[in-house]
Image (cartoon, helix red, strand yellow):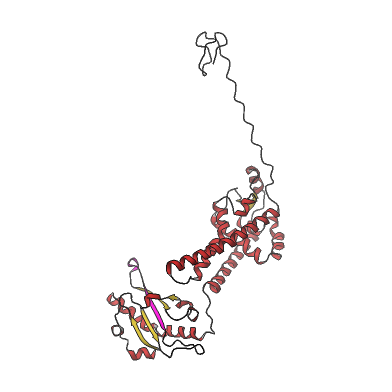
Amino acid sequence: MQCPRCNWQNPAANTQCFSCNAPLPAKPAARAQPAAKASNAPVFPSIWPRLGATAIDALFMAAAMAGLGMAAALTYQGLAGESRPVLLVVAAALVGWLLPAFMDAWGNGSPGKRLLKLRVVTRKGGAPGLLRSIWRHTLKYTLNLALPGLFHHIQQTIFGERAMHNSLAGTHVVSGQADPRAVLRAVAQTRAVTGAGRFLFIVFGVLALVFGGMVIGVVALDKDNGDNPLRAEVIHLDLVSDPVRMLAESHYQRTGAFAPDMAAIGVTQESLKASGFTKLEMNPVNGVLRFTIAGDPGTADAPSLGGRHLVYLPELRSEKKGGGMRRWRCGSDDIPREDRPYSCRHEAGALAR
């Protein structure tokens, strides 16, 4: 800084001139930055942006469910060389259905909320956790889609504009442009979940579990059709072959090796025919049992299981769990899947021989 008396150039930190000891003028104070203007956006958006975000999320979920389900099916077929299991496709589609909930919990919000500048917060103003977000998402898209008109009016009467899924999950949909301090004040003034709300929380939770069990039982497990006589015959043959499997399992537990033939487990040709089979092939390497079903080969007019095969693959326990036989996986290499019960859907393939 230059001294006004003697023109000596002084360091900026000096308060007096180094040459003449004259006081130096004070350093001008930095101009304060203007405070950022607080946003005047309303905290709680109207119903229309929320409906728009819901519609966008529904389209996103549909695309994700279809894409993930198809990807899982094609990947399984490419790796295993077998037809896709229904349960795998259902699980992949479930991930696609829950994607908006994952994004609300871990990201900046679902696609619909990000496009319309909305976000989901808890009573403390933070993002909901994973379990809370999944519960909110499940309530929102099951009951609202199942009863779109009637249920909307019922929940408005009980819960108001906040809606049931937000009330029971303890969440709020707020504007992403609102002042965070205003969000905290507005959220703190909303009514908490009452005793009736907790009761509904339990009731709808139980209903959701029952509904999920029905979906798995009807869709994933592919309930057997009792009108199929071939399937009923497979169920019967599976039962009568159980003693032979028990003998093979006993031989393995006793010797630590798979039996090489029927004589090793004490099964005769006569006892085998009495059970409805004409032949039993035993693989001493992998323990596979291949039963040939008795009877004449079927025709288009008179279908039959004669000459076809039931295959049982042993599944072993790990050594850490004590070893031994865990269970037998039932399947076939020449009986169509629709003629077999769900418990006998294993695709034997090359293991059958």
Of all residues shown, which one is farthest toward the front?
300
Which region is colored magenta? Answer: 306-321
On the image, the x and y values in percent for residue 78 come to 45, 67
Q: Is residue 241 visible?
A: yes
Q: Quadrant of residue 274?
A: bottom left
Residue at point 63% right, 43% down? 180
Q: Is residue 328 visible?
A: no
Q: Quadrant of residue 196?
A: bottom right
On the image, the x and y values in percent for residue 250 come to 32, 79
Q: Quadrant of residue 131?
A: bottom right
In the picture, measured across the screen, residue 61 lies left or right of residue 159, that is left
Q: Quadrant of the N terminus?
A: top right
Residue at point 52% right, 71% down? 220
Of all residues shown, which one is farthest toward the left?
255
Q: Count the marks: how many?
A: 0
On the image, the x and y values in percent for residue 96 come to 55, 61
On the image, the x and y values in percent for residue 318 come to 34, 68
Asked whether 266 falls inside the magenta stretch, the response is no
In the picture, measured across the screen, residue 263 lies left or right of residue 75, that is left
**Vertical order, 36 against 85 (above or below):** above
**Vertical order, 38 against 244 (above or below):** above
**Vertical order, 35 against 235 (above or below):** above
Of residues 155 and 150, the one drawn nearer to the viewer in this rendering:
150
